Image (tube, rainbow, N blue to C red):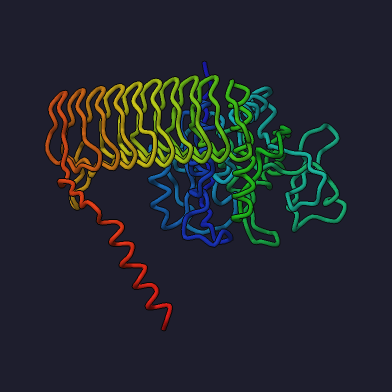
Amino acid sequence: MTKKLGCIILAAGKGTRMKSAIPKPLHEVAGRAMVQHVIAAAEALNPDRIVVIIGPDMEQMTEAVRPHTTALQSIANGTGGAALAAKDHFKGFDGDILIMYGDTPLVSTSTLQKMVDIRRQFPAIGLTFSGMHITTPNTYGRMVMDDDDTLKKIVEFKDAAETEKNITLCNGGIVCADGAKLFHWLSQVNNNNSQNEYYLTDLPAIARKDNRQTHVVEVPATEMEGINSRIDLANIEKLFQKKLRDEHMLNGVTLVDPDTVTFSYDTLVGQDVVIEPNVFFGPGVKVRNNVHILANCHIVGTEIEEGVHVGPFARLRPGTKIGKNARVGNFVETKNTHIGAGAKAGHLTYLGDAEVGEKANIGAGTITCNYDGFLKHKTKIGKEAFIGSNSALVAPVTIGNGAYVGAGSTIGQNVPDNALGITRAPQINKEGWAPEYRQKKIKEKARKDDK
């Protein structure tokens, strides 16, 4: 029989030190809120329940973590008090309970699984704590080991003696506990410390009274990195981006200048894709094989099929789909637009709420006028249609298959298949006008120069 698993994620931080009205765990890393990264790592374990601890007035957090349950820590009284707030959601629960932090977006599922596996190895193990060896100066709690290599106690840095501050094994924060005992132990935690807070780090000494051991699971320090400031947030973003870039390159993507490419947590890129410098991927991007993305592109919520060339300086907004071997060139912006296979929009174009047929050609300066001040409307451009430069297509409008639109036209009515649509004032040529005009201007200039 598979043993049950529950997860408690501590996410009641208000972001005070980040100088923000947004709860700290909702600040984003790689396009996703920190707490959602932690939830995703926990969900991969298939737990029976996840409970997120929030503070007062955190409706945003409640929405962000759905469909998972939230529990309120009404008073900010430490990590022990936060975990205890989940008690009512684990009545009668006899599985294992993982306690994690909502501001550690780099934590991996493999680390969490290791914490659970070690806890389950022997009945004598009541707790596993994550630990990390750090030799540089830091303010993490210090892990004091017993002679049998079990954890004797954790001393918070502010409460540590000088000899204890020299210990390099530091508290990583994650706890896996016997769920049948956890809340009984939490109820015994006191706040007799310099911060007057209830610490999870008191649990090993309390569990020892029940003849239950605490084991330390050493984990990579980078996974335990928390965020308390905008500087921390930027540093974590760098670490996360490095991880994503390496993964993509190992999977067959060429990054011409890796440090200048920004991925989102969910960016999918196929093999033999070349990405030039200064390209930004927001959430919801899928790129198939053999695509070339030139420099300085901004791409969000877009699907790009095989063989496509994008950019430079293209902006692809949500709802964009680009078919095989299509071309989207410099200073082209798309939004909620499907571009058919082999179609071309070479430069200086806006395509919003549009369908562009296969092998259609969109001339420079073309725009789809999709908004009437109140509603959005659709433009349909047929297969192999040709839209002349500097044209305005006033939606709703349909340009038929094989149809042409003359350059400089404003088209507000449908153009049938294979027809030419054109709106253009008649051209007037005045013979001999230019020399007469030049002489007139030369005389005007001379008079001004004489004054």
Q: Name the outermost residue toward the bottom.
A: 451
Residue at the image position 69 percent from the left and 37 percent from the top: 130
Closer-to-camera residue (115/301): 301
The answer to which image quadrant residue 134 occupies is top right
Q: Quadrant of the C terminus?
A: bottom left
Residue at the extreme right of the image, as rendered:
163
Nearer-the-camera pick, 276 or 20: 276
Between residues 10 and 443, which one lies in front from this camera angle? 443
Is 243 on the left or on the right of 413, as rendered? right
Query: Which residue appears at 74% of the width and 46% of the height?
Result: 154
Image coordinates of residue 122 in percent, x first then y, are: 68, 23
Residue 177 seen in this snapshot? no
Instruction: Give percent across and percent down for residue 298.
Output: 46, 40
Residue 66 versus residue 196 in the image, above or below: above
Q: Residue 185's spot in the image, x, y percent?
A: 61, 43
Left or right of 326: which side holds 356? Answer: left
Report the residue at 67% width, 26% height from top: 118
Question: As displayed, is residue 398 above or below residue 19?
Answer: above
The x, y position of residue 121, in whole percent, is 67, 22
Identify which residue is drawn at 59% across, 32% down.
Answer: 244
Which of the 4 image quarters holds residue 409? top left
